[in-house]
Amino acid sequence: MQQTFVNLMRGDPAPRFKAATESNPQYIFDTVGGRYVVLCFFVSGGTPGAAAALRAVAENRHRFDDERLCFFGVSVDSRDKDSGRVQQSLPGIRYFWDFDGSVSRSYGAVPREAVAGEPFSARQFWVVLDPTLRVLDVISFKPEGADCAELLACLDALPPLHLHAGQPLQAPVLVLPNVFEPAFCRHLIDLHVADGGRDTGFMSDVGGKTVELLDPGRKRRRDFIVDEESVILAVQGRIKRRIVPEIARLFFFDATRIERYLVGCYTAEEGGHFTAHRDNTTKGTAHRRFAVSINLNDDFEGGEVSFPEYGPHGFKPPVGGAVVFSCSLMHAVSAVSRGRRYAFLPFLYDEAAARIREANNQFLDPSIGAYKGG
């Protein structure tokens, strides 16, 4: 049977996937945006080409810092894991265990027709990605092994992260002032203060269920869920009048539903922050379409919303102002260094997404029931 391969080219979006690493059984590749990425499809650490490639990575260890640049090797050979002949080295160096070949197939290292357990031809190469996870270069191993010199020349020529597109970029977000009136902002803050909120984590798929995981290193925020009907109706009215028309005008999307009526608080005392993430990467959150971050106060420092794939610029709307963005857009909240940042943080979606949500409710762990409804 003739074997055919995917052929990625400069400018193509990198295929997205989830795969196991040494320390994470469900590493979401989407989360690496915001820095340059080197993928090495070496197939098996037992091949001469792989040995040369991994030796070059070790000799250039200083380049891979997880800030500007990170490295991922991709192995389809379980002996690499079982023997320990390739091992991650944090920060910056990780390996995907791609023993079913799905990742390698999507990038073109393994033929489309390859069947696990049966012999097949494979290709070995490097892929260099920009901070938005688009292909910058594909560098094939030469017959004598990995062409490390060509890779290093490519890495040496990379511009600063914020100029990866040849000029500074503006993240594709809406900034809307005057969504909530100051008095309404104050009322929402008072509700949070009276309750105190609770520490919350982030969503992850574990054992077939979407669960909430707590990790202060990734996120530190105290949340209060509004359940007072009059306040919910007041929020709905303002979002419908002041945000929904702008989303429709610019993105041709009719937002008809709101998920969660949540007031969050990032505090300087607790180092409140949220590291870079996307809001729709689990079964229980796949329906989310737009995230909304409405500042309820401005007497704090830090706490800016940024979009690492598009540069370091952070957004801090005025009191009652909102940042609105796609849930698939990587974003982070910088640590609050003074005071407390209060924000109202809903998600918007439509009727088609509501059907996705209904179908995926079976995957929600009961412990996150507070995020249902809307």
Image (spheres, rainbow, N blue to C red):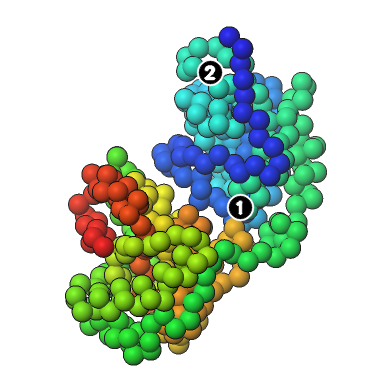
Q: Is residue 338 above or below residue 10?
A: below
- Whole-percent x, y for residue 348 in the image: 37, 63
In percent of the image, x 59 and y 35: which residue is there?
Answer: 73
For residue 293, say whether it is visible. Answer: no
In percent of the image, x 56 and y 72: which residue is there?
Answer: 314
* Label annotation for residue 118: none
Q: Is residue 285 above or below residue 111?
A: below
Which label's residue is closer to the chain start, 2 or 1?
Answer: 2
- Whole-percent x, y for residue 161 in the image: 68, 59
Q: Is residue 201 above or below residue 96?
A: below
User: Could you say which quadrant of the image residue 289 lies in?
Assistant: bottom left
Residue corresponding to mark 1: 132
For residue 307, say whether it is visible. Answer: yes
- Residue type for callout 2: Ala
Q: Secondary structure at mark 2?
A: loop
Please identify the residue farthest to the top as the structure is shown. Answer: 1
Quadrant in which the N terminus is drawn: top right
- Residue type for callout 1: Thr
- Whole-percent x, y for residue 103 in the image: 53, 32
Q: Nearer the viewer, residue 263 or 276?
A: 263
Q: Is residue 66 above or below residue 85?
A: below
User: Could you say which quadrant of the image residue 225 lies in?
Assistant: bottom left
Residue corresponding to mark 2: 114
In percent of the image, x 55 and y 39: which residue is there?
Answer: 15
Q: Secondary structure at mark 1?
A: loop
